[in-house]
């Protein structure tokens, strides 16, 4: 008996040693590279041209930032002008870009910490100084505080917390199920208590639950953002900011019961959209003061249905390998040969979606720029540049695109003067060597980013990103993350209702 007991102890000891060694190896593989030092707030730039897109531009200015706000914008040499840094003399200063539809990693622990820190740097590198997170399990509330306090280098963030959806929910891990008006009141009250900046609604809500959510949200001064649910007509939804142009296509009200069912129904709906339907959506949006965040870049990426081909494109190289190899991989659509043949009859929605966006713009409807990061091959920061170019194809001028991506987006967020350059406004500024409001190709002339009053040089951002990429490319990191991600459940599982 004693010998058996000692044998068990030895086995347990050996197992413990293996577990400890494995944990240490994983910790080493996932350790964060030297982080970018978050600079103090406050800076003054001299001899720059200040551009408020769609409003005004003033040459040879001094811009002084104190704490998190712009203190002074004045002519160089004017009485009382502060002493300022002249290294960006001749440059163009614009408001920071705002991405109105993103998702952070729906994970916790070291993988999310490492990937999240890199994502925040990527936003800054591409001039995105504000993000609106439109669905997470709740961790973004604390991350919003940490970003604002300068604990992490990154953009300011707004969040709605978990998505409110019906039963079963589309995105179970990031959703809260709301079945009744009473549950709607409780859910909205809880979000307001946590400090949500808006309420996100989704596909499976019943008309009664959606209406109750909207009443509860407006009583608390919270905008309603989200999808027009499958059982609600566009004109009856009354959502303040519709995402992805959901509800725009005219189709029967029903709950989809499979992905092929959803795919075919959506493809047919966009194919059948005619001028009369477009005019109806424009008119209804204008009369009901509905804004739209179309996220054209994700429509392009996802509806190509060529994820394997996209994996070899340069855009895929901007993220760690486990994103294209694991996180962005989707299981087979499950289409039968007959369904696949039928799907091929229809073009993807992008052409019709762009036509609708063009008509909405011509009709004076508010349009926001958002991307739907982290959907397949939609990369933080870079994808907003893609969305800006998509808006050009919809009839916007470069300056109109800039106006929408800064002041226009900022007007829908709960922070006064966000997206504008004026004394007292939030100090989110971009410094370009060339003027990108005349040509979006000049976006690459970005030289510095001021986010929440903190100046990050292009050199510092590129250096920090390079350190992360060096870590991502190490065999230990790649193997460890690939294994961990394959063991984890799919982050955005869709629960389909049982056909009745």
Image (cartoon, rainbow, N blue to C red):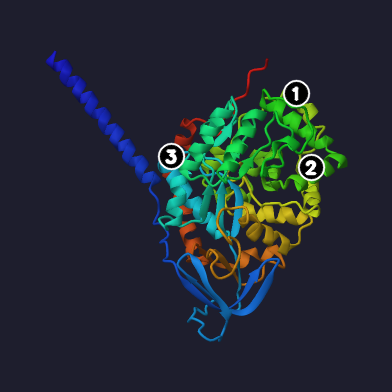
Going from N to C along the chain, the mark reached first, 3 or 1, is 3
Which is more foreground, mark 2 or mark 1? 2
How much space separates mark 3 and mark 2, taking CA atoms? 40 Å
- Residue at image position (55%, 57%) is 415
Which residue ends up furthest to the top in the rendered image?
A: 1
- Specify few, some or many for label 3: CA neighbours under 10 Å numbering under 14, 14-19, or 20 or more: few
* Location of residue 167 (image quadrant): top right
How much space separates mark 2 and mark 1, taking CA atoms? 34 Å
**Mark 3 falls on what kind of element?**
loop
* Location of residue 436 (image quadrant): bottom right
How much space separates mark 3 and mark 1, taking CA atoms? 39 Å
Q: Is residue 177 above or below residue 480?
A: above
Callouts 3 and 1 close, C-beta under 8 Å: no
Left or right? Give the position of 459 relative to 90. left
Residue 312 visible in image: yes
- Specify few, some or many for label 1: CA neighbours under 10 Å numbering under 14, 14-19, or 20 or more: few
Which residue ends up furthest to the front in the rendered image?
A: 219
The x and y percentages for residue 411 are 63, 56
- Residue at image position (53%, 63%) is 426
For residue 281, which numbered disc appears in the image?
2
**Residue at mark 1:** 337
Closer to us: 374 or 466: 374
């Amino acid at each position: 008996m004693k010998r058996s007991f000692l044998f068990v102890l030895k086995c347990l000891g050996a197992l413990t040693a293996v577990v400890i060694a494995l944990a240490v190896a994983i910790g080493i593989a996932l350790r964060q590279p030297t982080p970018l030092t978050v600079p103090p707030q406050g800076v003054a730039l001299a001899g720059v041209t200040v551009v408020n897109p769609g409003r005004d531009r003033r040459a040879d200015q001094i811009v002084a930032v104190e704490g998190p706000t712009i203190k002074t914008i004045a002519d160089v040499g004017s009485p009382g002008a502060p002493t300022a840094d002249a290294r960006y003399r001749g440059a163009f200063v614009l408001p920071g870009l705002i991405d109105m539809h993103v998702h952070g990693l729906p994970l916790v622990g070291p993988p999310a910490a490492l990937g999240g820190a890199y994502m925040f740097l990527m936003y800054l590198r591409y001039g995105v100084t504000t993000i609106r997170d439109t669905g997470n399990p709740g961790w973004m509330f604390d991350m919003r505080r940490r970003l604002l306090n300068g604990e992490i280098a990154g953009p300011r963030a707004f969040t709605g917390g978990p998505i409110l959806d019906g039963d079963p929910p589309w995105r179970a891990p990031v959703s809260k199920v709301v079945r009744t008006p009473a549950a709607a009141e409780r859910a909205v009250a809880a979000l307001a208590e946590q400090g949500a900046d808006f309420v996100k609604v989704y596909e499976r809500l019943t008309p009664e639950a959606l209406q109750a959510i909207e009443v509860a949200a407006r009583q608390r001064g919270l905008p309603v953002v989200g999808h027009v649910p499958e059982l609600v007509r566009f004109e009856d939804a009354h959502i303040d900011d519709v995402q992805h142009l959901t509800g725009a296509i005219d189709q029967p009200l029903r709950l989809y019961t499979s992905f092929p069912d959803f795919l075919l129904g959506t493809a047919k709906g966009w194919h059948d959209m005619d001028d009369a339907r477009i005019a109806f959506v424009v008119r209804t949006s204008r009369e009901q003061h509905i804004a739209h965040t179309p996220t054209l870049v994700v429509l392009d990426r996802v509806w190509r249905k060529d994820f394997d081909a996209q994996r070899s494109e340069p855009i895929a190289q901007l993220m760690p390998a486990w994103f294209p190899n694991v996180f962005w991989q989707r299981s087979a659509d499950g289409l039968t040969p007959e369904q696949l043949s039928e799907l091929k009859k229809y073009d993807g929605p992008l052409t019709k979606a762009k036509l609708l966006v063009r008509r909405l713009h011509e009709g004076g409807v508010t349009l926001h720029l958002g991307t739907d990061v982290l959907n397949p091959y939609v990369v933080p920061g870079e994808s907003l540049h893609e969305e800006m170019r998509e808006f050009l194809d919809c009839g916007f001028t470069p300056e109109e695109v800039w106006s929408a991506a800064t002041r226009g987006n900022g007007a829908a967020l709960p922070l006064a003067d966000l997206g504008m350059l004026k004394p007292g406004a939030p100090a989110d500024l971009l410094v370009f060597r060339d003027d990108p409001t005349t040509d979006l190709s000049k976006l690459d002339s970005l030289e510095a980013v001021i986010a929440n009053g903190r100046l990050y040089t292009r050199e510092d951002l590129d250096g920090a990103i390079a350190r992360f990429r060096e870590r991502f490319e190490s065999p230990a990191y790649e193997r460890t993350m690939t294994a961990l991600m394959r063991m984890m459940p799919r982050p955005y599982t869709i629960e389909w209702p049982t056909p009745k």
